[in-house]
Image (cartoon, rainbow, N blue to C red):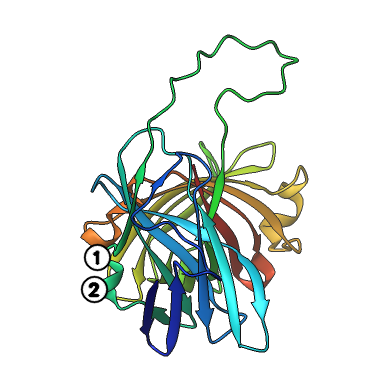
Amino acid sequence: MVQLAHDGLELWYGTSDAPAPDGTTEQRQGVSVTVGVRPANPSNAVSVRYRVDGRGAETVSAPLVANDFQERTQYFRATFPTFWSGETVEYVPVVSCEGRRAPDPATADSFPSSFQLGEASSPRRLSPQRPSDPQAVFPVRLEHLARARVQLAREPEFFGDTPAGFVISWPPVSGTLDGPALHTRVIAGGMHQTIIRTDGIGILNVSVTVETHDHVAVALRYTATVDFGEDWAVWLPLGRWPASLPVRSQILLLTADPKYRWLNRLHCLGIGEARLSEYFYTYDMYAVR
């Protein structure tokens, strides 16, 4: 049994009510960790940090699976991705709630639990697939990292109709990225420029900095498409914004801090919307696994 506490939060695993591998040998697919958390709170979010053979740390989210209202306890379960290589997996669950986190930072960096991986099966030979074959050759999984809520400046900069397209710059003034993997605030400024094509599709280029709850700077660089609609040239110069504009982005993160170097390995997708009449931009950020 492993029991950890910090900031008024308690978590445990490796028990009958929260089974988890520790000191065991496991299969390479479908390994899961159940984490008990107390006190129960709708804002509780649990993730599991792990590393394989001492390499860079990664994170897998743990969705809520059960509530024990009588004991004021919640249970979360994380399922690791398939381990195609490696021998030893070290891990530590982390719970966060309204700016508080458990375990303490030193323990979160120590990976107190581990398990061995069984022999890898012989790789399956992939044959070319027919268009009618529904089986994906390269399966994909999206892991939710954070919800972004960004407040934009009250007035955008209209550069107007340039040779490259109609250009708008609308920098953020504040915001947060908060979720199972990240707890950050957006630093005002940076680049947030959109070039709108003649068909109404805007190409958004963003370069901003966020700061984690423990004061680590992380650079976000991403491109996105914003669908302004085919009639954009009629209403946009007049500032008559629609209720929302769908935004789809590709995101890369960069930092030098050892605790967050796992972010450098991620390729992320953003799915959200811009509510420009409210000067507000929100999206969910997912890691592609």
User: Horizontal placement of 5 versus 124: left or right?
Assistant: left
Q: Nearer the viewer, residue 127 or 254?
A: 127
Residue drawn at the location 75% of the way across and 61% of the way down: 242
Residue drawn at the location 69% of the way across and 10% of the way down: 130
Which residue, given by chain and number where applicable, does mark 1 sit on?
Answer: 110
Residue drawn at the location 41% of the way across and 33% of the way down: 84
Residue drawn at the location 72% of the way across and 23% of the way down: 134
Dividing the picture into quadrants, the one containing residue 243 is: bottom right
Which residue, given by chain and number where applicable, does mark 2 sit on?
Answer: 106
What is the quadrant of the N terminus in the image?
A: bottom left
User: Horizontal placement of 130 versus 279: left or right?
Assistant: right
Q: Dot 1, how many residues are within 10 Å of its Cα: few (below 14), some (14-19), or many (20+)?
A: few
* Residue type for callout 2: Ala
Q: Position of residue 132 (x, y in %)?
A: 75, 15
Residue 89 visible at all: yes
Q: Position of residue 6 (x, y in %)?
A: 36, 85
Label 2 vs label 1: CA separation?
Answer: 6 Å
Mark 2 touching mark 1, by CB under 8 A? yes
Q: Position of residue 277 (x, y in %)?
A: 68, 69
Q: Nearer the viewer, residue 139 or 264?
A: 139
Q: Position of residue 110 (x, y in %)?
A: 24, 65
Q: Dot 2, how many residues are within 10 Å of its Cα: few (below 14), some (14-19), or many (20+)?
A: few
User: Horizontal placement of 126 versus 42: left or right?
Assistant: left
Dividing the picture into quadrants, the one containing residue 28 is: top left
